Amino acid sequence: MSGVDTRTNLAGIELRNPVLTASGTFGYGTEFKAFMDLRRIGGFVAKSLTLEPRFGNPPPRIAEVRAGMLNAISLENVGVEAFINEKLPEIPDGVPVIASLFGTEIPAYAEVAKRLTGVPKVAGLEVNASCPHVKSGGIEFGQNPVVLAELVRTVRAATDAPLLVKLSPNVTSIAEMARVCEGEGADGISLINAVQAMDVDVRSRRPVLKNILGGFSGPAILPLALRMVWQAAQAVKLPLCGIGGITDADDAIKFLLCGATAVQVGTANYTNPMAAAEIAEGIAAYADANGFARTADLTGALEAP
Amino acid sequence: MTTDQTAPTSVDPGAPIRARAQVVSNLSEGEANHRIELRVERWPQWQPGQFVMLAPGAESAAPRYDPLLPRPMAIYTADSKGNFDQVSVLYKVEGRGTRLLAAAEPGEHVRMVGPLGTGFELPPEGHHAILVGGGTGTASLYSLARAALERGPVSVILGARRAALLMAESDFEKLGAKLHIVTEDGSRGEQGLVTDVLGPLLAEGGDPAIVYACGPTPMMRACHRLTREAGVSCRVALENRMACGFGACLGCAVPMAEGGFSLVCKQGPVYDADTLEWEGIP
Ligand SMILES: Cc1cc2nc3c(=O)[nH]c(=O)nc-3n(C[C@H](O)[C@H](O)[C@H](O)COP(=O)(O)OP(=O)(O)OC[C@H]3O[C@@H](n4cnc5c(N)ncnc54)[C@H](O)[C@@H]3O)c2cc1C
Ligand SMILES: Cc1cc2nc3c(=O)[nH]c(=O)nc-3n(C[C@H](O)[C@H](O)[C@H](O)COP(=O)(O)O)c2cc1C
Ligand code: FES
C-alpha cells in the first residue's frame, strides 16, 4: 500500500495503526479470527472482565433502534482466569490486547487490574467506568467525579500497566470527568461508552428491553461522541481514544481531527466483521491522498471554522 | 426423560465467511412469503439448522444505517451449481429489514455472513423423525427433512393461521415425506393447531420417534410438553433476536434449565428442549 506510517502510540501502547475494536463488541477476539487476520487492526479491547465469571441480564437484551441499537447485556463475562487461560492463548502473537475491567465496587476493579498486570499479550488496561456503583445506589462510577477519582486512584495504585479510563457519556460535563482522570494518573482516556436510552413497542405497550434501560450505540450517536471527544481534547493533555458510531474511515478520521490519538470501532463489527480492518486501511489511504506522511499527524488537525 | 443417542451429522460445518452474494432471483411466493436465491463463489460445509446473517437490503442502497443490523435467516438450501454455489433463503416480510430485502433485484449484491450456529443432529438409525414447523420456522426444517429422509421415515407437520401464510408446502410435498397441513381457520388441511396432529402421531407407536420443532415460542413449548408426556426426545430451533450472529455481542442469550445462559447464535439455535428454561424465553 501507501508509504504512510500508521504506527500509533496510545498512552504507551504501541499499535500498528490507530484502529482498535471496542469492548463488548469484539468478544474475546477469537470470534473474529474466521473473518480476518487480527494483525490488520491496531489491536482490540476485550469484553469487560470481573474477577469471577458472571451472568448477564435476562432476554431480550438487545433491540434495533433508528440507526443504532440498544443493549442491556450487563456484567456477563467469563471471568479473569478463563480469559487468561482459555482466551488469550487463542490470540496470535503481535496483536495488542487491551483488557477491560469492571466491578460493582472499587476494590474489585483493583483486584482485576492486579491480576491482569504483567500477563503476556495484555498491552494495557481499560477501566470501564459505566458500571453501576453499588455504594452510590447504582449510579455509574463515571457519573460522580468524587467516585471516579477514587476509582482511578485505586486502580492506578494497583498496576503499572498503561491505563486507559473509559468515560460514561451520561454526565453533565465530560471535560470535568476527563480532568479527574488526568489528575489521578490515568495514561489515557477512552470515550464514549453507550448512551443510556430506552425504546417502547407500542403494540405490546412494553419496553423493548427486559431491563427497560439500555446502552444506545451505533451510527446515530456519532455526533454526540465527537462533541465529547472534542471537549475532552480541549480540557486535558492525555491521549484520547475516540469511540461512538464509527462505521467507515471518514467517521474515524473525524475523531482523529478532533483530537483523538486512536479510535475504537464498536457496533459496526456486527454489521461487518471486517469493518475495523477496512477502516484502518481507509485512514492510511486518506492520509496518503491528503499529504500526511503519518496517520498520527491527523490527530488534532481540525482546521478553524 | 429419554436417553437415546442421536448420531452426529456426517459433515462438520466449515468456518463462516463473509460473502458478497449476487441475487439470482427474489420472488414472492404469495402474501408475505418470499424466496431469495443467492450466488456465492464457494459456500462452506454446512448443517441443516444453521443460519446466515443477511444484510437488510441490497448493497447498492448502502451505506444505509437504518435499519442497521443484519437479519438471521435459516439456510434453506445451499447447492453447488458447477463453478459457483447457490444459497437460498425463505423469508417472511415482517418489518423494515425484510421489506427492504424484498426490494433487492436480480444482479444486485447482498452481504451475508455464514454458515453460523450449531445445526441439527440427524435422527438416530431406526427412528421416525417428526418435524413440526410453524410460521418462518418451517424454513429451518426443510434441509433437515431432506437429510433425514435418507436415513428413515419422516413425517412433517406444517401449520399456519391460514392457507396463504403456509411456507414451502409444495417443496415438502415433492420430498416425499408424510405431510400434514394444519391451519387455524381450516382454509387448508386440518383445522386446528400443529399439536392437534402431533399428539395422536406420538401415540401411534411403531418406531421410536424424535421430534424437531421450529416456530413461535408458544408452539415449541406446546410440542415440548407433548413429547415429555410421550417420553420422546424433542429438539427445537430458536428464532431469537440477534445483533452479530457469531458470539461477539452476547445479545442472543437464553436462560438454561440448569441455570446460566446459552448463546443462541453459537451453542444454538438448535437445543434439546429439556435443557431450556422455557419461562425466560421471549
Ligand atoms: C436462527 C434464526 C433463523 C431464522 N430463520 C428465518 C427464516 O428462515 N425465515 C424468516 O422469515 N425468518 C427467520 N428468522 C426470523 C427473522 O430473523 C426475523 O423475522 C427478522 O429478523 C425480522 O426482521 P424485519 O426487519 O422483518 O423485522 P423488524 O422490523 O426487525 O421487526 C418487526 C417486529 O418483530 C420484532 N422482532 C424482530 N425480530 C424478532 C425476533 N427474532 N424475535 C421476536 N421478535 C422479533 C421486532 O421487535 C418488531 O416488533 C430466523 C431467526 C433466527 C434467530
Ligand atoms: C452489545 C454491546 C456490549 C457492550 N459491552 C461493553 C463492555 O462490556 N464494556 C465496555 O466498556 N463497553 C461496552 N460496550 C460499549 C462499546 O464498547 C462502545 O463504547 C459503544 O458501543 C459506542 O461505540 P459504537 O457506537 O461504535 O458501538 C458495549 C456495546 C454493545 C453494543
Ligand atoms: S447474536 Fe451476538 S452473541 Fe449471539
Image (cartoon, rainbow, N blue to C red):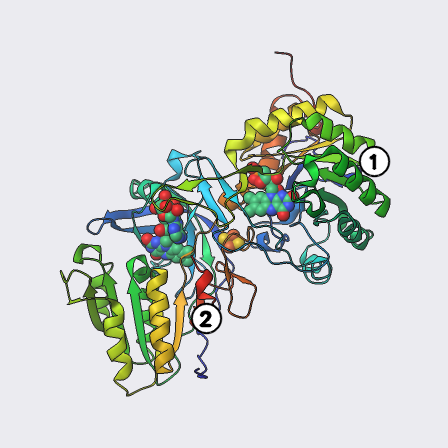
Asked which secondary structure carries label 1, the reply is loop
CA neighbours of label 2 inside 10 A, class few (<14), some (14 to 19), many (20+): few
Question: Which kind of residue does numbered mark 1 sit on?
Answer: Gly
**Left or right: A130 with respect to A105?**
left
Q: Quadrant of residue A254?
A: top right
Q: Which mark is residue A185?
A: 1
Q: Quadrant of residue A236?
A: top right
Q: Which residue lies under the disc numbered 2? A: B11
Question: Which kind of residue does numbered mark 2 sit on?
Answer: Val
Please provide percent x and percent y for residue B201: 25, 79
Chain under numbered label 1? A
Mark 2–mark 1 Cα distance, whole angstroms, equals: 54 Å
In-front residue for pair A301/A68 = A68
Please provide percent x and percent y for residue B163: 17, 58
Q: Quadrant of the N terminus of chain A?
A: top right
Q: How many marks?
A: 2
Chain under numbered label 2? B
Asked which secondary structure carries label 2, the reply is loop
Residue occupying the far top of the picture: A305
Residue B225 shows in this picture: yes
Q: Name the residue rendered at 56%, 50% in the picture.
A: A73
Q: Quadrant of the C terminus of chain A?
A: top right
**Left or right: A153 with respect to B95?**
right
**Left or right: B205 with respect to B118?**
left
Please provide percent x and percent y for residue B180: 21, 71
Please provide percent x and percent y for residue A3: 68, 31
